[in-house]
Amino acid sequence: SPLFALSLGRRAPGPGPVPEQDQQYLIARSREMWQYFETFCTESDHFLPPDNWQEQPPLGVARRTSPTNIGLALVSAIAALDLGIAEQGGVMRLIERMLTTVEALPKWHGHLFNWYDTRTLQGLSPKYISTVDSGNLAACLIAFRGGMNEYGRPDLARRADALFDAMDFTPLYDETRRLFLIGYDLSSNAPSKGWYDLMASEARLTGYVA
């Protein structure tokens, strides 16, 4: 109806102020989430973020990590600084150590393997390159670079740039189909037999940054 069409054409109201109670709740939850990285990104795991910690049943820390985990740890560090829930010196020391480890990890065409043992830093078998995980890490490196420049650490921004620039997405792209592969199997030295479409795909972020 005309009235319905008119209502759709109206400008949406801008966001209002967040109530103080909601702000406190969000900050408290954010502090809890950052505590995960502060607690588990330690020297015993080469300052990499373990994939998870399981309380029940009590299996403890899963001492493996992925490109997505690493990328989210880096942008979480920026968020912790932005929210004022972490001390800058400690965050920067953790970032420096994490980047040093990531730079030393074995890679394929600049891409991290899908899983690493956080104690030995060896890729877990079967060794695989995940297009989605690589895209997630690449996007996080871009955001992290901007954050480091804002916090006056261009040296760390350059290190993130170097990791990003080394990531060659060409082997993960099918020129004939014009689609990204699911990934690349290093154990068989062969690309996956599946592809990501362009819409409603978890690989969309990869398409934006590759």
Image (spheres, rainbow, N blue to C red):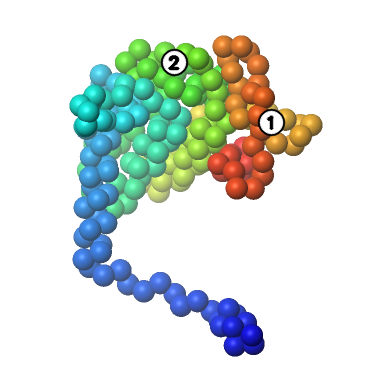
Mark drawn on residue 173: 1
| Image location (x, y in percent) of residue 158 | 47, 34
Estimate the spatial distance between the alpha carbons at disc 2 and disc 1, rounded to whole Å. 24 Å
Residue type at mark 2: give it.
Leu
At x 34%, y 33%, the residue is 95
| Image location (x, y in percent) of residue 172 | 65, 28
| Image location (x, y in percent) of residue 149 | 43, 45
Q: Is residue 77 left or right of residue 113?
A: left
At x 58%, y 39%, the residue is 203
Residue type at mark 1: give it.
Tyr
The quadrant of the rendering that contains the C terminus is top right
Q: Read off the residue under disc 2.
A: 124
For the residue pair 47 and 7, the one nearer the viewer reads as 7
Q: Is residue 97 visible?
A: no
Looking at the rendered structure, the secondary structure element under dot 2 is: loop
Of pointers 2 and 1, the one earlier in the residue sequence: 2
